[in-house]
Structure formats: C-alpha cells, structure tokens
Image (cartoon, rainbow, N blue to C red):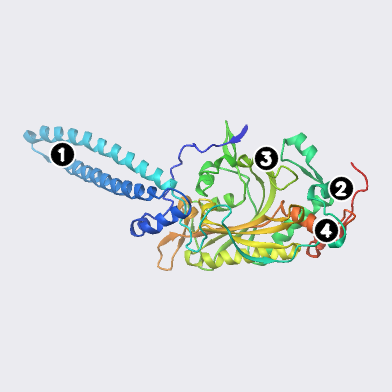
Amino acid sequence: MVFRGTGVSQPLINLGPMLDIQFIRDHADIVRESQRKRSESVELVDEVLKLDSQRRDSLQRYESARAQQKEIGKKVASAPADEKQALIAETKDLSKKVAQLKTASDEVSSEYTTAMWKLSNIVEPEAPEGGEDDYVVVKKVGTPRDFAAEGFEPQDHLALGEGLGGIDTVRGAKVGGSRFFFLKRQIARMEIAMNTMAFDQAEEHGFIPTITPTLVRPEIMAGTGFLNSHADEIYRLREPDDQYLVGTSEVALAGMHENEILDLSNGPIRYAGWSACYRREAGAAGKDTHGIIRVHQFYKVEMFVYCKPEEARDQHQQLLGMEQEMLAKVEVPYRIIDTAAGDLGSSAARKFDCEAWVPTQNRYRELTSTSNCTGYQARRLNIRYRQEDGTTAPLATLNGTLATTRWLVAILENHQQKDGSVVIPAALRPYLGGKEVIEPLGKAE
C-alpha cells in the first residue's frame, strides 16, 4: 500500500447532479452571483445551461429515432414479402443512425456532468464576500488572561506538554515523520476525556454516538465534495486498494446513507462520529510546524445532521450552540467568525468557525467549524427523504466539530500556572478521576 495525495486531476466519478438543474435554469443569476462571491468561474453557469440544452436536445433526437426503430421493427414481422426487404434495409440504416445518436447523446451528457461537477454549492446570501481574511467577527466570549499582571511569561503548549511529560514531537517525527507526535500520561488522558465529554454532550442532545470507518471508497469521498481543489490534502491508498483516509468523520457519516431514503417524520437524524483523522497538509508547507496545531493525524468528535431543507438553517445554529457549550466547559476565551464565501469549501453554503485565544501567539486560532451543506452532498450521494405526500426529495446535511486534538493547545496555554503545571477545567475533572492539576514531571525524560 502506498500513501499519497490524489492531485486535482483524478478522473471524474460519475455521480448525480451536484445542484438542482431546474433551479439553475430558473435562477441562473443567483448561481452566477454565488460563483462570483466564491471568486470562481461565473461563465461556468452559462456553460452548464448550454450543455443542459444540448443534452436534452440530443436525448430527444436519440429517443425519437429509437422509437421509430422499434416501430419499423414491429412492421417487419407482418410485412408482405415484397415489402420486407425494403423494411429490413431501412431498419439497418436506422440502427446505424440510432447508434450514432446514442454516442452523441452520451458524449454531451458526459460534458454536462463534468461541468456540473465543477459548480460549488450556492452560498447563502448572508455569507460575507471575499477570501480567507474577509471573515466577519460575530461575537467574542471571555477575556484573555493578563500573564504580565500575574508576573510570568506564558509557555507555549509544546513546552508545557514536554514539561508535563505528555507531548513528544521528537519521537513522533522519528516514527512517522514531521507533524506526527506522541501523547502520553495525563495529556493523553485529557484528550480521551475531552472527546468523551463531547460524546456525552452530543448524546444528551439526541445525537447518536458513532465510531466511524476511517477508510472510505472514492465515491464516498467525492460525494461529500472533498475531491476538489483541496484533494492534495487527502491521503489515498492505491494498489491493490483504492480507498481514502478521511480527514473528518463527516465523510463516513455522509456516506453511511448513500442511495437511501430516510424517514425524517420524527425530526432530523443526528450523529456524533468519533474517529482518527488524517490530513496531508500539503498546502501548509512551513506553517505551524511547531507543536500539535497542524498535524497529519489527530482525533475528533464530529456532529452530522440529516434534515429537511427548511430545517437546515435552524439546525446550523443549533450546531453552533453545541460548539459554544463545549467551549464553555473547557473555559477558554474564543470568538465566532462568519467565514467569507471565497474561503468556503465547495460543499458549504455557509460556515461559522469558533476560534480560541492562544496566549503565546497573541491571536485566535480555529478550534471548531460548522457548515450548512444544504442539498449539495445529498444530491451527490443520492440521499433523499420521504415527504408527506409519499414522494421523495433531496434532504440537507450539516456538520460541526465538537472536540479535536487541537483543543489541547488552547486548554494547556490558557490554564497554565507559573510553575509549569496546568489546571484542569472543572468540567473535565470527573473524566480524569477528579484530578484538578497536572503537575510537571520535575525532570526531562
């Protein structure tokens, strides 16, 4: 097995439409505006519409010729002898025409699917315009500590973790290469505690606790919208396998109901997935190489929701509320940002990030994100719900982070003491046997 990135030139996996083509026909200006806000091709919308028209015309010509072929075929059996040969000859000529029309129809249909594949989800109109730095701060919660007033210079999370005998990036790199690490002792226990607390909170709110696969088929990875411009961030296993390592359990949770019709009559179906996650960080060369902020392997509890389209916005706010509830439990200052359209993944219509204050970096860093993917993933994975009239329709999917390894960075730095110890947030203590403080080892290992 060989691990390597996919590159962006992977063959197109022939899935269903990513967006509702009827919506594009009726509201092309909205789709064009969405593409513009994303800084993506506006002309692509017109290409899709042109190919859609050609596809329908080509299919109609093929089906018309095919119907004519069948009709003549019926006549041959009962035709008089003197007419039969002429009909057979006509059938042969028509058969060639039908084959040519079928080929032409398939070709334009393939071009149409390829163009549709390139369209990203339609952003919500409230999403800010711009790129990575054009987010809007929604609110700030908590006040950063004044370490100068407390009389000491704060240590960064790696120095703290090493002093506690809990983070070992040197041996992690020896075993796995750069951006790998070992967690040990109480820091390892703290990560398990944090994720368990997230699992408990999710279950209290009606989420189904789930341990998910970390290897998925290409169709599942593509269906969730990850095989796009960020495909180089994903590990792929090739020969004899063809599978991807997930960077979030969102992928497995979305794929769980591929090609299914769900019953949402009792409300949304909500999962909390706990899994190891893997990211190549190919686009982050030289960034955050210190410590465990940007690493290749980590653990995460991810929320995932299937709901009716009209419920999606409310569910999005509920996921954001769940993230804030968890952040309050670990007692770190944070802010919420509304991500700009140009910084959204292709599947997200809107995304909010919660960023915690990291004292030694003197800035906020992302700890959670929650995205409303509307019907984008459901259409690609052919997931529908049964409506009251018995018909089916694409549903909406949403996701949100509830805890991940990076949280340790904010917890360690914000709860450190002058002697290098770390106070355990009160909500975590029951998960750590009632322990209140993690003490330094006292000597290097």
To which residue does mark 3 refer?
Answer: 286
Residue 127 higher or lower than 345, as above or below? below
Q: Give the alpha-carbon distance from disc 3 to disc 2, as whole Å.
A: 25 Å
Q: Which numbered disc, 2 or 4, marks the residue that appears first in the sequence? A: 2
Residue 61, given in percent of the width and then of the height, sits at 23, 44
Residue at 47 percent of width and 37 percent of height = 11
Q: What residue type is labelled 3?
A: Gly
The residue depicted at 75 percent of the width and 36 percent of the height is: 173
Q: Which of marks 2 and 4 is in front?
A: 2
What is the CA distance from the residue labelled 2 to the residue labelled 4? 19 Å
For the residues carrying marks 3 and 4, which lies nearer the camera in this image?
A: 3
Quarter of image, res 122 = bottom left
Tell me which label, 1 or 4, sits earlier in the chain: 1
Q: Residue 432 carries which label?
A: 4
Q: Which of marks 1 and 2 is in front?
A: 2
Upstream in sequence: badge 1 or badge 3: 1
The span from disc 1 to disc 2 (Cα, nearest Å) is: 91 Å
Q: In this view, does 51 lie above or below 263?
A: above
Q: Tell me the crowding category of disc 2: few under 14, some 14 to 19, or many 20 or more residues within 10 angstroms, Cα based.
A: some
Res. 130 in view: yes
